[in-house]
């Protein structure tokens, strides 16, 4: 055997490469069976990440003795289970009756055995998304003091069916991340017993919580808000916070929240909220002060420019004075991804986004990701884009209505961004690698005359694809040349994709942008040939 294999770090890297290249794990399996020296490490790799619990349960043999409590898991099962770090119990097809029955029977046999210690002494992550309600009673078998992450998909019923929930603080004291499915299991009425949130709030090390449902009660929301260890929260905000689908900011919870305003989710770093409208989210963010680093707001209905401005102003005011520089990522999007505004209609100001909407965010000078996707129109100029870029010099992702367009009105001309504005953006934000904006390239595209040193600084080598929505152009050759000067490695431009191509002249402009892509491709071939 080569001496290099005696170095543990080298051997681990080799096995990791083998595992990555061999999705069927046949090579690792062969190593475990044929090489006595490599077998322990190969087995560690084979069992450490188990996407399906069934291979492990194959070690469970039928119990012949009438007294199953005298039986214990076999040595092979215990050896494999001790190696598992990440385990999943995925949903099985309802039509696969044989697999369904076999899995239930093996779990039942395991539960009847005499078990004195944890079956999975090194388990770190458990994902249980099985759709058979009868098997959820067996989750307790997989809980371990070492468990750090737990994902549960309560697809069909409520917490009273899962007594193990109340035991989580005792069985899993190191649990720091929990994800619970969309079903309404988060909060219960008082006569139904304790809610899942009550148990969650008793976990001493919980830092991340994802509640995919939107049924949390006011009482439980208040409980969560006081959890000092919580730094990451993904939550659906329920309908009880608004009496008119979000047209009014929620006031029903104001009394309780006023009492807890100073400590309302005071240590959150990462926040992901889902709600019907922006005003609901604004009301949630409003009280208290917290050092947020990233926010994602998903809403069902399109906002207005006023509601967006209010939301961004509240987001700024909710940051501690010294914490504005900690904000790294802001994403806001509605669910109307395929909705488009008629280009011929006169849009009210409430449907047009100007630079004033973004001004509250200019204090976040360390912002790296800004992604806004809403069913609104935009009116921005080159100077507006320069102001935004100057405020966010560390920007890496800048997307304004990616794949949606800005819906410029034919009857009411608005401000627009030209290639020169795009050049200024790249000069002021040299870290950009993803850009989605809309250009007005109907006029000639002159590039600002710069010295060789300045030109080198404005060229962006990271961007290989641009998303330009419903950008309009006149001369494909002129546009391709101008964009190539700014992005030497540009390979493709995405513009006027569905449903934008269904608008008037949509197919015409899409064809012109395809010509630009052909020119870029031809330049690339020519450059390689040289």
Image (spheres, rainbow, N blue to C red):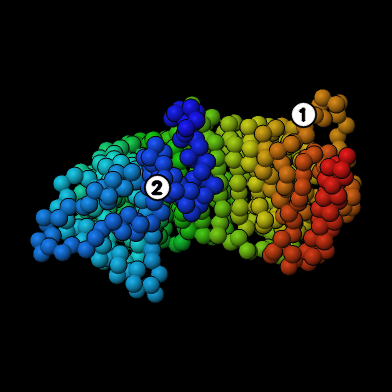
Q: Quadrant of residue 231?
A: top left
Which of disc 1 and disc 2 is earlier in sequence?
A: 2
Front-most of residues 61 and 522: 61
Tag 1's secondary structure?
Answer: helix
What residue did someone put label 1 on?
Answer: 457
Q: Is residue 174 above or below residue 26?
A: above
Q: Residue at x 51, y 43 (%)?
A: 18
> Can residue 143 be seen by looking at this rendering?
no
Q: Residue at x 46, y 35 (%)?
A: 12
Q: Residue at x 77, y 57 (%)?
A: 412
Mark closer to the observer (2, 1): 2
Front-most of residues 87 and 410: 87
Q: Quadrant of residue 233?
A: top left
Q: Residue 68: give x, y in percent of width and height.
A: 13, 60
> Can residue 103 be seen by looking at this rendering?
yes
What residue did someone put label 2 on?
Answer: 33
Tag 2's secondary structure?
Answer: helix
């Amino acid at each position: 055997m080569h001496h290099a294999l005696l170095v543990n770090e080298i051997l681990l890297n080799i096995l990791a490469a083998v595992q990555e290249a061999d999705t069927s794990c046949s090579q690792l399996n062969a190593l475990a069976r044929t090489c006595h020296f490599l077998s322990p490490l190969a087995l560690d790799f084979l069992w450490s990440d188990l996407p399906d619990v069934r291979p492990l349960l194959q070690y469970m043999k039928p119990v012949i003795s009438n007294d199953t409590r005298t039986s214990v898991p076999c040595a092979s099962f215990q050896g494999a289970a001790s190696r598992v770090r990440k385990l999943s119990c995925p949903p099985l097809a309802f039509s696969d009756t044989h697999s369904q029955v076999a899995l239930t029977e093996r779990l039942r046999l395991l539960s009847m055995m005499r078990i004195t210690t944890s079956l999975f002494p090194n388990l770190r992550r458990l994902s249980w998304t099985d759709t058979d309600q009868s098997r959820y009673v067996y989750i307790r078998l997989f809980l371990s003091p070492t468990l750090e992450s737990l994902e549960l998909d309560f697809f069909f019923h409520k917490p009273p069916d899962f007594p193990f929930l109340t035991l989580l603080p005792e069985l899993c004291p190191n649990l720091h991340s929990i994800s619970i499915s969309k079903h309404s299991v988060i909060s219960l009425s008082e006569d139904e017993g304790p809610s899942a949130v009550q148990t969650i709030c008793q976990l001493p090390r919980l830092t991340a919580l994802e509640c995919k449902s939107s049924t949390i009660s006011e009482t439980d929301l208040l409980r969560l808000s006081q959890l000092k260890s919580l730094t990451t929260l993904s939550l659906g905000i329920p309908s009880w916070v608004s009496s008119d689908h979000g047209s009014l900011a929620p006031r029903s919870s104001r009394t309780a929240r006023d009492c807890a305003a100073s400590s309302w989710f005071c240590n959150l770093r990462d926040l992901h909220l889902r709600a019907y409208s922006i005003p609901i989210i604004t009301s949630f963010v409003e009280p208290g002060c917290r050092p947020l680093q990233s926010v994602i707001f998903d809403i069902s209905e399109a906002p207005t420019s006023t509601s967006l401005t209010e939301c961004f102003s509240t987001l700024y005011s909710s940051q501690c004075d010294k914490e504005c520089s900690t904000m790294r990522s802001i994403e806001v999007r509605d669910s109307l991804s395929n909705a488009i505004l008629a280009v011929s209609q006169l849009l009210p100001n409430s449907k047009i986004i100007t630079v004033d909407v973004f001004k509250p965010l200019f204090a976040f000078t360390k912002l790296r990701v800004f992604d806004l996707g809403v069913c609104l129109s935009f009116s921005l100029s080159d100077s507006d884009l320069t102001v935004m870029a100057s405020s966010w010099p560390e920007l890496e992702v800048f997307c304004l209505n990616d794949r949606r367009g800005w819906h410029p009105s034919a009857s009411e001309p608005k401000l627009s961004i030209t290639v020169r504005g795009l050049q200024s953006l790249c000069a002021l934000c040299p870290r950009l690698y993803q850009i989605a904006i809309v250009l007005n390239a109907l006029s000639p595209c002159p590039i600002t005359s710069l010295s060789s040193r300045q030109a080198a600084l404005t060229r962006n080598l990271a961007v290989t694809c641009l998303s330009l929505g419903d950008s309009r152009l006149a001369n494909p050759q002129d546009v391709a040349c101008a964009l190539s000067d700014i992005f030497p490695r540009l390979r493709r431009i995405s513009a006027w994709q569905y449903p934008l191509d269904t608008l008037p002249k949509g197919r015409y402009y899409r064809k012109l942008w395809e010509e630009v892509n052909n020119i870029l491709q031809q330049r690339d071939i020519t450059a390689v040939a040289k």
